[in-house]
Amino acid sequence: MEDSIFADEPSTDTNTAETLAPWHVLVVDDEAGVHQVTEMVLRDFKFDDRPLKISNAYSAKEGREIMAREEDIALAIVDVVMESDDAGLELVRHIRQDLKNHYTRLVLRTGQPGQAPEEQVIINYDVDDYKDKTELTSNKLITLLYATLRSYRDICVIDQHRRSLEQVIISSTEIFEANSLSTFASAVLKQVCNLLHLKGAIFYCASLNEDLGEIEDYQVLAATGDMSQYQTKHKADLPEQVIQAFERAKSERHSFVEGTAYTGYFTTSHGSENLLYVSMNEELSDMDHQLLDIYANNVAITYENLLLGDEIIDTQKELAYILGEAVEQRSKETGSHVRRVAMYSHLLAKLSGIDDIEAEIIKLASPLHDVGKIGIPDRILKKPGKFEPEEWEIMKTHAQIGADLLGRSDNDVIKMGKIIAGQHHERWEGGGYPNNLKGEDIHIAGRITALADVFDALGCKRCYKEPWPMDEILAEINKQKSKQFDPSLVDLLNENIDEFLKIRDEYPE
């Protein structure tokens, strides 16, 4: 009966088997004859079109060394009695507890069953089976291989799915932390391809121009596997077969399979079109199609939501610029100043090690640094000469006016604007206004904008002065190091002056 079970095991093509990684089996036994017989019995064994690779250890010590060195051992068949009566048992304990290896299937076999009773061993040691050498015939050995390798294969698949889920969760976090839909979509698509054993995929996303009712701005939102090189916004850069598949999908308005490729066509409730091209190793099941549909639909909806969020951020940024520029124009100054201060502040924030999100908030808020000047009378704000003492006291109130004006909002940018407006005239050594703060009691955003503001203002024409040459600007900045300005920020400005000059050139008067 046993012979007939394995006699009909389907044969596989030799060339196919040789292209797949073999199952790695470790035999640990101090009897050379056991190794010879085991290799002879398993010489032609194959499972899932994969042959065996057998490693041999003639002691528990050698077994430890091989287990520590090799990470792909699917099955270890371990003798109990070798250097000592419990050498095999200690090896098993070492594999599970010290090496933390819970994937390799472990089978104990012994020629002295009385030495370690079966029930006691199975209870106390994490092994998959325990065999007496006298009962482990060739048929039973082959049966054992099928059972343990299936178990190892399934454990690896479960672990792969766990890791895939872990990556999806991590990627989901990234989208909220970094607002990077492309990172998120590519990471998830990669895991979908791993789960479905796909060679590669491209997700091609479009937005709808609601004013014209037309689809526009197609771009590759995610690409992975053998398609990962096509992160492009230009359709002409895509492979010809992908372009043709997308054109057919848009024309026919449905998904289809052609050859070894699946092309998905999806629309959202707002009318956007989204296309997914997948290169397959084998035919997709209905469940596979469903998973791809879920992926495409959800990422497309997220894409639309983020586009809306980007529009809100862009509007918010433009409003900050407009408000800052309105104040500048009221004092007969150019609006380019607030844009340069925003870019200088962002650069200083990044150079200071501030994370991307807060650096962006500082960039959006810094144009509001002088918003309090809206409360300063024209006779003072536009005065071409030196202020009288009482005029200077009125002029200084613009910092507190700005902080008060921006102090009624829970918006992150406006709250940062309040800090910047109220603190950009404080001094590192003290003596600034409006609150005589000093050192690190001044918020880093206030210190950054203070330096960015003065660095730019010295180079600008004002109603009371001509622009300074750059060497004089840097001389004054360095003179005020540790006095008016945070010394570490002055150092960053000096070390990266070319980047600051590049910004100045990009936003001329």
Image (cartoon, rainbow, N blue to C red):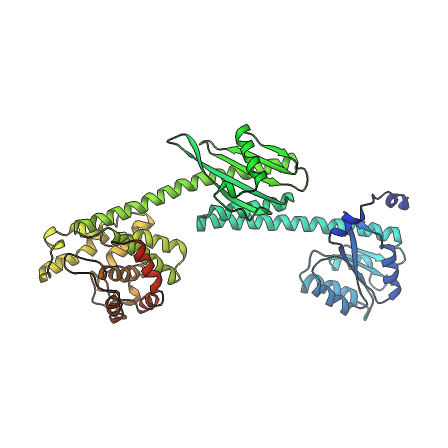
Q: Is residue 487 visible?
A: yes
Q: In which quarter of the image is residue 488?
A: bottom left
Q: Compare residues 132 and 268 and report the one nearer the observer.
A: 268
Would you place residue 103 above or below residue 297 in this image?
Answer: below
Q: Indicate the position of residue 15 as horizontal and vertical percent values.
A: 78, 49
Q: Indicate the position of residue 198 as horizontal and vertical percent values.
A: 63, 44
User: How many numbered circles are shown?
Assistant: 0
Q: Compare residues 369 and 347 and report the one nearer the observer.
A: 347
Image quadrant containing the N terminus: top right
Would you place residue 464 above or below residue 15 in this image?
Answer: below
Q: Can residue 47 be seen in this view?
A: no
Q: Indicate the position of residue 392 as horizontal and vertical percent values.
A: 12, 60
Q: Indicate the position of residue 228 as horizontal and vertical percent values.
A: 56, 48
Question: What residue is drawn where x is 66% and y is 61%?
Answer: 100
Judge left or right: residue 122 versus residue 419.
right
Would you place residue 189 above or below residue 387 in this image?
Answer: above
Judge left or right: residue 223 versus residue 445.
right
Q: Quadrant of residue 343?
A: bottom left
Q: In which quarter of the image is residue 241?
A: top right
